Image (cartoon, rainbow, N blue to C red):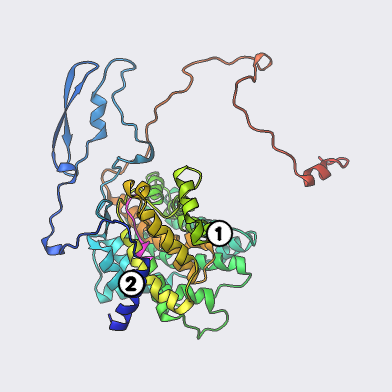
C-alpha cells in the first residue's frame, strides 16, 4: 500500500473512529492459534429432574452441544412426551455442523474458511472469495481462471426471464424484481429440478457446480435489470471480459457504448463490499436456504426463499433503514433528542447492535477504509457528519455501552452505496448479489451432510384442547377474532353501481 493511500485511509479512519470506549480485536498469527474448546469441549452433563427425582447423564459433544434427542428420555408422566427446548429465534440452538465461516461476536472476529475477513478483503477479489467460501480452499491460478470463466459464461439471461421482468410494474421494488427473476430461473432449468428430474439429480458434482455458476453469473444481470426497471433504460448485456464487479457496473452504466469501462477504484470498492457480504454464518436468510433445501427443492427456489428473507428490514434491508434514519435526524443538533427517543422506546436506531456481535462488527471497520476511496471520487456525503456524531454520542452514552451496542456493517454500507449513486431501495440488492456465494455454499454443504433431515421444528401448543362444531345459527361472534372490514375502492364502487356488473 502506498504512503499516499495510507494517508487517505488514516484521515478517514480518524474522522470516523469513535471516541467512546470500545473493545479491540486481538490480532493472532494463524500458525500460533489453537481454538479454545467450544462450550468447554466434550464431556457429560448430570441432570436431576426435580419433578421425579430421577438422574440423567447427557453427552456433551466436542462442539459444546447437547443432542436434543437425548432430552426425550426425560419424562415426568403427563402426556408421556419427553422434555423439549423452547428457543424462539433459535438464539442458542445449533441446527447444523458447518465448516464455512466462523464468528466470535465477543471479540469481533469473522473468518471465511479460517481466513480473517481483514486479510480476505485486503488481498482477495470477490470471485476468489466465492471460490474459497464454496470449495473450502484458495484456488490456484488455473482453478480461479476456470471458475471465473464458467461464471461469466453463464451471465446472460434466458429471454423468458427478461420477459417476466419486463411484465412487472415500472415501480416494482428492486428486491421484488430480483426475487421474481430467480424464481423464473427455476422454471427455465427443469433438468436441475429434483421434483422433475428425480431426487438424485444433485448427486452429480457437475449438476451442483453448473447451478452455482448459473446463479453467480446471472444474479448480477438480474440485479442490473432490477436497477433499470426504475430508470426506464435498458441494462447493457454482460461483458465476459471484465471482472465481476466491473461487469456489474458496466451493465448499469455502459448504455450503448461497448467501450465504456467503470472507474477502477470504484469497481474495487464495490468488489470489497461484495467480499464483506459474501457469507455470514447461520443468519436468517442462510438458515432459510438450508430450511428450504432440506425438503429437496431445487436450488433456485431455495435461494429465492433466502432472498425473500433478506428483503426484510431487520435483515438485509437494515442499511436502507439506516440511511432513512440519518435523513430523518437531519442535523447533528437533533441527535440528543433522537437518542432520548431510542431510550424511551419511541425510536429505533438501525445500524447499531447485532444478534451475534458484542463488539465492533469487523466488516464495519473495513468499510470505513473503503469509504475513503469512494468519497474522494464521488464527493463528501453530508450524512457522514451525522453518522459520525451519532456514533460518537452513542458510544459515550452508558445506555448503549452497557448493552454493547456497537456500529455494524449496515451503519456504514448504506453511506458508501449512497455515495456510489445507488438509490436506497437498491441497497438490499447489493447485499443479495454477493451473498449468493454463501447461500450456495450452505446448499452444497447440506447435500453431503449425513445429519441433514427435512427441517420440522416442534411447537409448544397452548391453544384450545378440544371442542365440537356448533351449528352456524347458534354461534356467537362476541369475544372472537375476525378479519377487519376491508373498504371497497372507488373503482369497485363505480363498477358495481352499473347494471349487470357480474
Residue 389 appears in which quarter of the rendering?
bottom left
Left or right for 125, reference 50: right
- Of tags 1 and 2, the one toward the viewer is 2
Left or right for 419, reference 89: right
Number of numbered discs on residues: 2
Structural crowding at the residue carrying mark 2, measured as other residues with C-alpha within 10 Å and reported as few (<14), some (14–19) or many (≥20) = some
Could you say which disc has been placed on residue 125 in the image? 2
Q: Which residue is mark 1?
A: 177
Farthest residue in the left direction?
32
**Residue at 30% from the left image edge and 78% from the top image edge:** 6
Report the magenta residues as a range: 274-282
**Where is residue 260 drawn, in percent x and y?**
50, 84
Q: Is residue 383 above or below residue 22?
A: below
In which quadrant will I find the C terminus? top right
Q: Is residue 218 visible?
A: no
**Where is residue 68 drawn, in percent x and y?**
26, 33
Q: Is residue 373 above or below residue 277?
A: below
**Where is residue 314 drawn, in percent x and y?**
45, 49
**Where is residue 199 drawn, in percent x and y?**
38, 48
**Residue at 88% from the left image edge and 40% from the top image edge:** 499
Between 65 and 147, the one lying in front of the other is 65
Mark 1–mark 2 CB contact (< 8 Å): no
Q: Does 355 appear in magenta?
A: no
Structural crowding at the residue carrying mark 1, measured as other residues with C-alpha within 10 Å and reported as few (<14), some (14–19) or many (≥20) = many
Q: Is residue 192 visible?
A: yes
Could you say which disc has been placed on residue 394 in the image? none
Label 1 and label 2: CA atoms lie apart by 27 Å
Dot placed on the residue nearer the N-terminal end, 1 or 2: 2
Majority SS type along the magenta span: loop
Between 140 and 200, the one lying in front of the other is 140
Amino acid at each position: 500500500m502506498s504512503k499516499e493511500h495510507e494517508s487517505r485511509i488514516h484521515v478517514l479512519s480518524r474522522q470516523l473512529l469513535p471516541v467512546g470506549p470500545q473493545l479491540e480485536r486481538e490480532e493472532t498469527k494463524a500458525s500460533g492459534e489453537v481454538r479454545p474448546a467450544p462450550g468447554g469441549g466434550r464431556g457429560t452433563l448430570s441432570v436431576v429432574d426435580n419433578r421425579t427425582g430421577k438422574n440423567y447423564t447427557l453427552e456433551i459433544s466436542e462442539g459444546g452441544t447437547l443432542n436434543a434427542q437425548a432430552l426425550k428420555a426425560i419424562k415426568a408422566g403427563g402426556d408421556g412426551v419427553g422434555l423439549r427446548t423452547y428457543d424462539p429465534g433459535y438464539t442458542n440452538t445449533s441446527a447444523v455442523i458447518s465448516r464455512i465461516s466462523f464468528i466470535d461476536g465477543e471479540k469481533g472476529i469473522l473468518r471465511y474458511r479460517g481466513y480473517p475477513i481483514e486479510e480476505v478483503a485486503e488481498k482477495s477479489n470477490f470471485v476468489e472469495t466465492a471460490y474459497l467460501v464454496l470449495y473450502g480452499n484458495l484456488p490456484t491460478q488455473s482453478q480461479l481462471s476456470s471458475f471465473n470463466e464458467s461464471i461469466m459464461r453463464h451471465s446472460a439471461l434466458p429471454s423468458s426471464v427478461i420477459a417476466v421482468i419486463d411484465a412487472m410494474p415500472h415501480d416494482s421494488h428492486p428486491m421484488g424484481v430480483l426475487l421474481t427473476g430467480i424464481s423464473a430461473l427455476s422454471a427455465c432449468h427443469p433438468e436441475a429440478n429434483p421434483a422433475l428430474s428425480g431426487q438424485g439429480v444433485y448427486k452429480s458434482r457437475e449438476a451442483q457446480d453448473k447451478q452455482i455458476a448459473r446463479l453467480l453469473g446471472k444474479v448480477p444481470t438480474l440485479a442490473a435489470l432490477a436497477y433499470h426497471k426504475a430508470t426506464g433504460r435498458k441494462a447493457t448485456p454482460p461483458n465476459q471480459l471484465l471482472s465481476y464487479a466491473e461487469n456489474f457496473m458496466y451493465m448499469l452504466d455502459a448504455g450503448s457504448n461497448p467501450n465504456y469501462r467503470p472507474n477502477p477504484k470504484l469497481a474495487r470498492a464495490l468488489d470489497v463490499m461484495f467480499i464483506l457480504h459474501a457469507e455470514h454464518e447461520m443468519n436468517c436468510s442462510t438458515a432459510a436456504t438450508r430450511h428450504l433445501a432440506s425438503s429437496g427443492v431445487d436450488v433456485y427456489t431455495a435461494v429465492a426463499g433466502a432472498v425473500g428473507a433478506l428483503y426484510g428490514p431487520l435483515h438485509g434491508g437494515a442499511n436502507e433503514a439506516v440511511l432513512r434514519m440519518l435523513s430523518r435526524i437531519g442535523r447533528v443538533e437533533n441527535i440528543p433528542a433522537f437518542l432520548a427517543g431510542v431510550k424511551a422506546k419511541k425510536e429505533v436506531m438501525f445500524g447499531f447492535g447485532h444478534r451475534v456481535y458484542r463488539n465492533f462488527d469487523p466488516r464495519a471497520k473495513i468499510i470505513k477504509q473503503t469509504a475513503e476511496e469512494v468519497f474522494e471520487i464521488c464527493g463528501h456525503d453530508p450524512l457522514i457528519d451525522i453518522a459520525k456524531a451519532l456514533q460518537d454520542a452513542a458510544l459515550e452514552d452508558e445506555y448503549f455501552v452497557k448493552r454493547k451496542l456497537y456500529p455494524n456493517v449496515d451503519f456504514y454500507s448504506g453511506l458508501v452505496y449512497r455515495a456510489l449513486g445507488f438509490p436506497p431501495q437498491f441497497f438490499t440488492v447489493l447485499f443479495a448479489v454477493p451473498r449468493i456465494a454463501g447461500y450456495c455454499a450452505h446448499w452444497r454443504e447440506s447435500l453431503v451432510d449425513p445429519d441433514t433431515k427435512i427441517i420440522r421444528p416442534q411447537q409448544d401448543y397452548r391453544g384450545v384442547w378440544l371442542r365440537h362444531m356448533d351449528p352456524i345459527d347458534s354461534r356467537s361472534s362476541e369475544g372472537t377474532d375476525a378479519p377487519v372490514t376491508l373498504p371497497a375502492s372507488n373503482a369497485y364502487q363505480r363498477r358495481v353501481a352499473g347494471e349487470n356488473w357480474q
